[in-house]
């Protein structure tokens, strides 16, 4: 390892924060729902190649703790990092895999340079409705998680650049707002690129 002076460190840090902010701007500009566009209920983060958080955008900082724990759980218990390929996107909303609640869909994409994984881009978007017993996926009468909406285990929604359209259809079919949720999910995938 070579020494990095204070100026180089500041430049690197600013570049990583800028990447997270650019992801954030992409979501804001291309999303459809008021939850995302007006309330800004989403977060973006850049993780290092091993999944440790290194930069975040100034949106919903409370999400970042769940994103980090979700990514750790995902890597350790579901989809090991050594199986991630260029063009993959992993998605989950499962609270039992580190997610806060079902409307918060987390996506992670590895970043490769010259065939080597150098980072992971992470994005959490609160979706308007993911099914369940009440609009907005907030059912005060729910007694179990199955009444709150669709639960998605950690899964590749994009596999080496090929989008799993069937999985997206299942996700959207379970929403009362498929047009808005579909638009927000498309913006989520676009921001990871």
Image (cartoon, grey):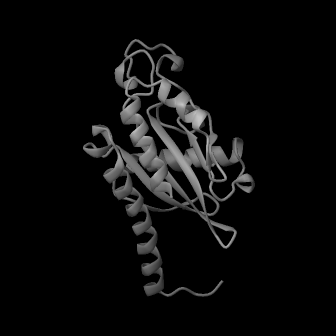
Check the image and name the residue furthest to the right.
82
Task: Tell me which corner region of the image, top left, top right, bottom left or bottom right, holds residue 168.
Answer: top right
Which one is in front, 148 or 3?
148
Give above or below for 126 relative to 50: above
- The residue sitting at 62% across, 87% down in the picture is 2
- The residue sitting at 36% across, 25% down in the picture is 136
Give above or below for 103 relative to 56: above
* Image spot of residue 85 (x, y percent): 69, 56
Label count reads 0
* Image spot of residue 152 (x, y percent): 57, 32
Task: Tell me which corner region of the image, top left, top right, bottom left or bottom right, holds residue 3.
Answer: bottom right
Check the image and name the residue furthest to the left.
38
Which one is in front, 106 or 112?
112
Q: Assign the N terminus to one quadrant of the image.
A: bottom right
- The residue sitting at 48% across, 39% down in the picture is 105
* Image spot of residue 54 (x, y percent): 50, 64
* Image spot of residue 187 (x, y percent): 42, 48
- The residue sitting at 37% across, 16% down in the picture is 140
């Amino acid at each position: 390892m070579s020494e990095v002076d204070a100026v180089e460190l500041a430049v690197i840090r600013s570049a990583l924060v800028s990447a997270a902010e650019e992801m954030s701007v992409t979501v804001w500009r291309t999303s459809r729902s008021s939850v995302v566009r007006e309330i800004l209920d989403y977060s973006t983060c850049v993780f290092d190649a091993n999944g440790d958080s290194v930069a975040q955008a100034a949106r919903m900082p409370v999400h970042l703790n769940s994103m980090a724990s979700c990514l750790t759980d995902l890597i350790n218990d579901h989809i090991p990092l050594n199986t991630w390929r260029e063009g993959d996107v992993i998605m989950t909303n499962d609270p039992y895999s580190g997610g806060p609640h079902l409307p918060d869909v987390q996506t992670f994409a590895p970043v490769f340079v010259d065939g080597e994984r150098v980072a992971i881009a992470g994005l959490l978007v609160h979706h308007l409705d993911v099914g369940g017993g009440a609009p907005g996926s907030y059912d005060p009468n729910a007694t179990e998680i199955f009444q709150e909406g669709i639960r998605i285990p950690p899964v590749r929604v994009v596999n080496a650049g090929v989008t799993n359209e069937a999985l997206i259809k299942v996700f959207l079919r379970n929403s009362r707002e498929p047009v808005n949720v579909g638009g927000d999910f498309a913006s989520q995938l676009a921001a990871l690129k």
